[in-house]
Image (spheres, coloured by chain):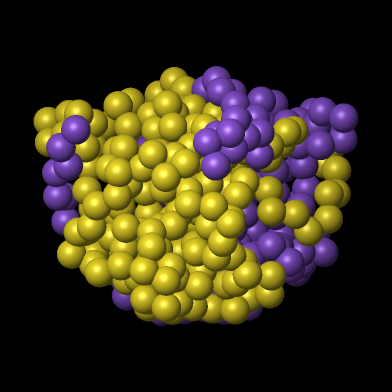
Chain colours: A purple, B yellow
């Protein structure tokens, strides 16, 4: 197996599809973000790499609050639409027919149709180059009751999307569960 | 669809399975990280949330360099093993039979068997609480020639793992491609 040098590239697989919400000039708007991940455990934090020109970024800075909404695979058109157009030009909430609700964090608009919603408060905004890394605490998580199993979120019911850039830019669902974590590798301990 | 409040939780789906490498006291070691994502576009950067007690973290700080290696689904045991044990106690490279090579970033050990390898230099380490957010530039990407299609990385050949915590902690492969990005949502423009 030979290796091919590809240059400095953002090759991470899989990436999530997140609908990040903020109130901009008092109105809820949502953008699609794939460049995000958990940033801290205690307290729970999330990081999102957002271009500062983005309309939603204006609302995040204004209010130092945002939401993260996880669309299920049956919302792929709406999720994609939120990544195609700018809230500066269209009302995405109307076009996507999102039902918006709020939790305890002011100005963090949540999408009813998304099975998972996180309410977040900004703790850092780090200018890194083309993007600003927005780091926020997760203040509350909402999960649709239809996506719980024994009171816990169930990914087979949530049906999240993965954004993949290779070979084409595409959305994939999750597939087979192939192993239990913190267990599958235990047999290698015999080699220690 | 009613919503259930779950408290402050790190509910993001899917998360990647990354084997993060560093030289610790001159020897390569690898840890499993699910809390990571792209942090910037130009220049390309990645962020990883790592507990500072971790053995690999010592090497990252020592050298201000690290690697990110993406295991394919046939490496699930090795990937899991790297998340179960500490390099302070065992030589994970030996146990996992990793072939280690280096690129242009000194002290960023790369795993030959992983189809994608990123060489990274640390630019920020942000203490956020239980974890430190390590932000690094991606200096070079290596991709196995068997995982390319028309010269581009092909996720159907890379077969990356996803780490999912709900309802159990498990590894999943990616499933069906359900839509083209920047295209699937275009039909909603008719509603604008």
Q: Is residue B173 above or below residue B53?
A: above
Q: Is residue B135 above or below residue B17?
A: below
Q: Nearer the viewer, residue B66 or A58?
A: B66
* Residue A79 seen from this side: no
Q: Nearer the viewer, residue A141 or A155?
A: A155
Can you give x and y, in whole percent of width and height, for residue B86 in the image? Answer: 58, 55
Q: Quadrant of the N terminus of chain B?
A: top right
Q: Is residue A35 above or below residue A192?
A: below
Q: Quadrant of the C terminus of chain B?
A: top left
Q: Nearer the viewer, residue B93 or A127?
A: B93
- The residue drawn where x is 75% and y is 54% is B9
Q: Is A99 on the left-hand or right-hand side of A90?
A: right
* Residue A3 seen from this side: yes
- The residue drawn where x is 59% and y is 79% is B127
Can you give x and y, in whole percent of width and height, for residue A74 in the image? Answer: 57, 26
- The residue drawn where x is 33% and y is 26% is B156
* Image-quadrant location for residue B169: top right
Can you give x and y, in whole percent of width and height, for residue B18 in the image? Answer: 46, 48
Q: How many marks?
A: 0
Q: Nearer the viewer, residue B118 or B91?
A: B91
* Image-quadrant location for residue A165: top left
Can you give x and y, in whole percent of width and height, for residue A20 in the image? Answer: 56, 56
- The residue drawn where x is 36% and y is 42% is B98
């Amino acid at each position: 197996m030979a290796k091919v040098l590809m240059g400095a590239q953002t090759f991470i697989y899989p990436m999530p599809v997140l609908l990040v919400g903020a109130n901009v000039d008092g109105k809820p708007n949502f953008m699609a973000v794939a460049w995000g991940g958990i940033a801290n455990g205690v307290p729970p934090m999330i990081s999102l790499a957002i271009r500062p020109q983005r309309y939603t970024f204006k609302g995040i800075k204004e209010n130092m609050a945002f939401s993260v909404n996880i669309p299920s695979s049956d919302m792929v058109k709406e999720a994609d639409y939120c990544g195609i157009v700018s809230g500066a030009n269209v009302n995405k909430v109307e076009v996507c027919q999102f039902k918006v609700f709020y939790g305890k964090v002011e100005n963090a608009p949540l999408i009813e149709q998304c099975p998972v919603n996180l309410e977040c408060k900004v703790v850092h905004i780090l200018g890194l180059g083309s993007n600003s890394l927005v780091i926020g605490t997760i203040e509350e998580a909402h999960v649709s009751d239809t996506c719980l199993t024994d009171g816990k979120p169930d990914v087979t019911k949530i049906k999240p999307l993965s954004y993949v850039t290779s070979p084409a830019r595409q959305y994939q669902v999750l597939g087979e569960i192939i192993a239990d974590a913190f267990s599958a590798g235990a047999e290698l301990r015999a080699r220690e």
